[in-house]
Image: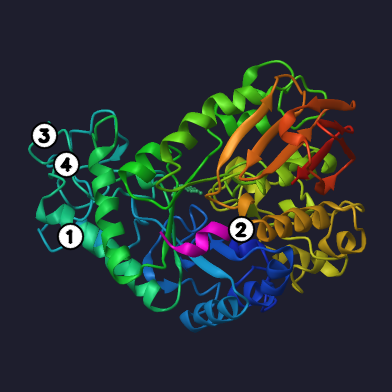
Amino acid sequence: MPEWLKDAVFYEIYPPSFRDGNGDGIGDLAGITAGLDYVRELGCNALWLNPVFDSPFLDGGYDIRDYKKVAPRYGTEADLVRLFDKAHRLGIRVLLDLVPGHTSDTHAWFQASCRAEPNEYWGRYVWTDHPFAGIAGHPYISGMKERAGSYMLNFFASQPALNYGWLNRTEAWMSAADSPEALATREAMKDVMRYWLDRGCDGFRVDMADSLVKNDDENKSATAAVWRDVRTMLDHDYPEAALVSEWSNPVQAINGGGFHMDFYLDHVGNGYNTLLRDYEAGGADRSYFRKDSGGDIRRFLDDYLPKYENTRSRGYISMFTCNHDTPRPAWTLSADEMKLYFAFLMTMPGVPFVYYGDEIGMKYADVPTKEGGYQRTGSRTPMQWDHSVNLGFSDAGAEDLYLPVDTAPDAVTAADQEQDPESLLNTARKWIAVRHRYPDLQADAPFAVLSAAGGQDIFAYQRGKLVCAMNPSGTTKQLRDEQLEGKNVLAVTGAAELSEETLILGPQSFALLG
Ligand code: NOJ
């Protein structure tokens, strides 16, 4: 387990939307490199970059044409190495995005696999042996290529599934997970990882990590075995490298696959959604962090606690503000509500991730789809730096921007929020700094619920010798507990008073006691 993860706070950057270094209207690596000081001042000491590789961009770059080539619109390999170097000088680690389950249909491997005659890449993707038969229960395409077969899709139509084999094999054409062709795919992906690790990256966020072996069992044990093999390589050759999975099943991903971290995604009805956007409940939004919503922290805890307990000795659950696939927190929460969420996120176990712009409360924008984003596009608009042209994102004409910037006169910006000690930006900075200051708040320090009475009553938890307590409601609340005796208020958002064993928390307040 890389030691640095204990105190890691990640910042996720969607590359075309962070900062444009060359004035063409699209964010790029030079822009990200220039923005690293801001990331460092926020207190983040790790980055996750969405794919920066050559791609036709039919899925925001998750459709890779060449794993070893930087997309020209973002710059060159030398620019990426410069980014790694500056990040490392600032004490920031950098994870790239590994997309192991599929490529773009323009990838040279796929083009070769489409030829009528067998060749080295025939087994690289999932193909049937007949053009008139599909793949029961799986999306596929037939009739478009010379090869007499149908090929399986992993996501959009432009993203054919790479072949890691099948566990439950019902057709002669299904490769076994330990067949030479499935092992060759696995080795090709390890080769990609080595390529970038050797150039200075610090690990990978792994896209659809659970999708590799088809017809896997309910524990995804064959897919997990692929990742354990990858982890063995890392432990041996790159022990400081970190892997975080897009899996959202930490028991499978961490215990089974050996991932260091697994994202707690916004899956329907799960604990994360009950905190920020409980629209699945039907009727009014009952999100816990919405003031006076009638939300209940126990709905989060019921989902989270068993996952935490079952994986805490082996890896970390990664909670986030949101990501490039989800609505932004500002879609449902006010700035004051987001402040409490930041305090919570930075005092929970595991490794937290902040999505660019959430630290200033950027809106979930109403914009047309871009590059396969569809409703996700609203969370991918340009970073709002200041009130200069295009909010400081780019010098290009507005018509050339990757996506429009927020044109509202009161659009939030980092520069404005710098000036206000109570801003969301400064509150986020404060709680990130607090996390760095106290090892008891970091990834692996013990966590135990102290009080979760339900409703929006005070929710309090112990982290090591510290106590965190929050009141997201609009009224003052009180908690009496002998664990509070002798403690002091170490940090607060809102208002907190502690006398002997009684804590009084003002409306929308969060306190760290120790
Ligand atoms: C998950 C990624 O986060 C998403 O943006 C992408 O479209 C799919 N995987 C397919 O790669």
Which of discs 4 and 1 lies nearer the camera? The answer is 1
Is residue 98 left or right of 236 when viewed as pictured? right
Residue furthest left in the image: 172
Q: Amino acid at mark 3?
A: Glu
Q: Is residue 463 magenta?
A: no
Q: Nearer the viewer, mark 2 or mark 1?
A: 2
Residue 4 in magenta stretch: yes
From the image, tell me which residue sits under label 4. 128
| Helix, strand or loop for disc 4 | loop
Q: Contact, CB < 8 Å: mark 3 with mark 4?
A: yes
Closer to the eye: label 3 or 1: 1
Callout 4 amino acid: Thr
Q: Front-most of 208 and 45?
A: 45
Circle 2: element type: loop
Which residue occupies 83% across, 59% down? Answer: 413
Instruction: Name the residue: 59% across, 49% down.
Output: 324
- Which badge, 3 or 4, is on the more N-terminal residue? 4
What is the distance, in whole Å, between disc 2 and disc 1 at their CAs? Answer: 35 Å
* Residue 170, quarter of picture: top left
Instruction: State which tag comes first along the sequence, 3 or 1.
Output: 3
Q: Which residue is label 3 attached to?
A: 171
Tally the numbered discs.
4
Tell me which amino acid carries mark 1. Answer: Ala
Please state which of the two labelled residues, at mark 2 or mark 4, is closer to the viewer.
2
Q: What range is drawn magenta here?
A: 1-8
| Residue topped by disc 2 | 9
Identify residue for label 1.
184
Upstream in sequence: badge 4 or badge 1: 4
What is the distance, in whole Å, between disc 3 and disc 1 at their CAs?
21 Å
Badge 1 marks a residue whose secondary structure is: helix
Looking at the rendered image, the quarter that the N terminus falls into is: bottom left
